[in-house]
């Protein structure tokens, strides 16, 4: 009897670990989760805070400003440090390059801190980053950049020839 009970307990623990049964039971039904997700989305849309930039802003200003946000090639960025850098880049984009709210801006380059800074800064000033595949060249690349008013892929994210 004890062996059977141990076997059942072990099987139940395995199934729970594999399929997250207890978690699902605590969370409720899928329709409940979908309703919560929809409620959250509507709330964020009403607040006009649906961008990734807004989460960085919240975390940098109130929740976890000194926690690690990014570790890229040995350089460590806290939420606050990265947010402050995003503000500087955003000011540069708006004041020096004249990028305006609602404008689509081509963003092209390899993964880097600069790429993320540009992405978040564009969102922060209300512009829309158009992510360009960094493998594009020639006419395909020219078309993608021409669709936007500003093609800043060569400014910070890396020099490339098309």
Image (tube, grey):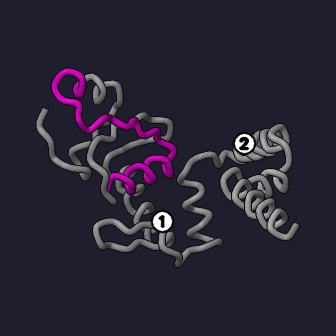
Left or right of residue 18, residue 113 in this image: left
Rendered location of residue 90, percent (x, y): 42, 55
Q: Which residue in the rendered view is the most extreme toward the left?
A: 161
Left or right of residue 128, residue 71 in this image: left
Residue at coordinates 19% horizontally, 21% vertically from top-left?
139
How many numbered circles are shown? 2
If you read the primary sequence from the N terminus, does the residue marked by circle 2 or circle 1 appear first? 2
In this picture, which residue range is highlighted in magenta? Answer: 114-142
Q: Name the residue nearer the viewer: 10 or 35.
A: 10
According to the picture, the residue beneath numbered tag 2 turns out to be 41
Rendered location of residue 41, percent (x, y): 72, 42
Q: Is label 2 in a helix, a strand or a loop?
A: helix
Rendered position, 127 above or below 84: above
Which is closer to the viewer, label 2 or label 1?
2
- Magenta-span inclusion, residue 108: no
Rendered position, 70 above or below 36: below
Q: Name the residue nearer the viewer: 32 or 17.
A: 17
Q: Name the residue nearer the viewer: 131 or 27.
A: 27
Rendered location of residue 124, percent (x, y): 50, 52
Rendered location of residue 64, percent (x, y): 60, 73
For disc 2, the neighbor class at 10 Å (few under 14, some 14 to 19, many from 20) is some
Which of the 4 image quadrants contains residue 112?
Answer: bottom left
Residue at coordinates 36% horizontally, 50% vertically from top-left?
93
The disc placed on residue 83 is 1
In the rendered view of the protein, which quadrant contains the C terminus? top left
Which of the 4 image quadrants contains residue 150?
Answer: top left
- Work out how far the residue at label 2 is from the one at label 1, CA to CA, in angstroms: 23 Å
Left or right of residue 133, residue 103 in this image: right
For disc 1, the neighbor class at 10 Å (few under 14, some 14 to 19, many from 20) is many
In the rendered view of the protein, which quadrant contains the N terminus? bottom right
Residue at coordinates 49% horizontally, 47% vertically from top-left?
123
């Amino acid at each position: 009897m004890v062996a059977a009970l141990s076997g059942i307990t072990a099987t139940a623990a395995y199934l729970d670990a594999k399929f997250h049964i207890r978690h699902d039971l605590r969370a409720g039904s899928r329709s409940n989760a979908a309703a919560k997700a929809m409620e959250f989305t509507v709330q964020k849309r009403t607040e006009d805070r649906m961008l990734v930039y807004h989460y960085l802003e919240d975390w940098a200003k109130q929740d976890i400003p000194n926690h690690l946000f990014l570790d890229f090639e040995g350089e460590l960025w806290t939420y606050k440090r990265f947010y402050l850098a995003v503000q500087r880049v955003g000011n540069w984009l708006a004041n020096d390059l004249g990028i305006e709210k609602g404008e689509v801006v081509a963003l092209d380059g390899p993964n880097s801190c600069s790429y993320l800074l540009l992405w978040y800064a564009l969102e922060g000033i209300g512009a829309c980053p158009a992510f360009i595949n960094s493998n594009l060249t020639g006419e395909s690349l020219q078309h993608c950049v021409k669709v936007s008013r500003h093609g800043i892929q060569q400014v910070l994210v890396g020099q490339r020839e098309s």
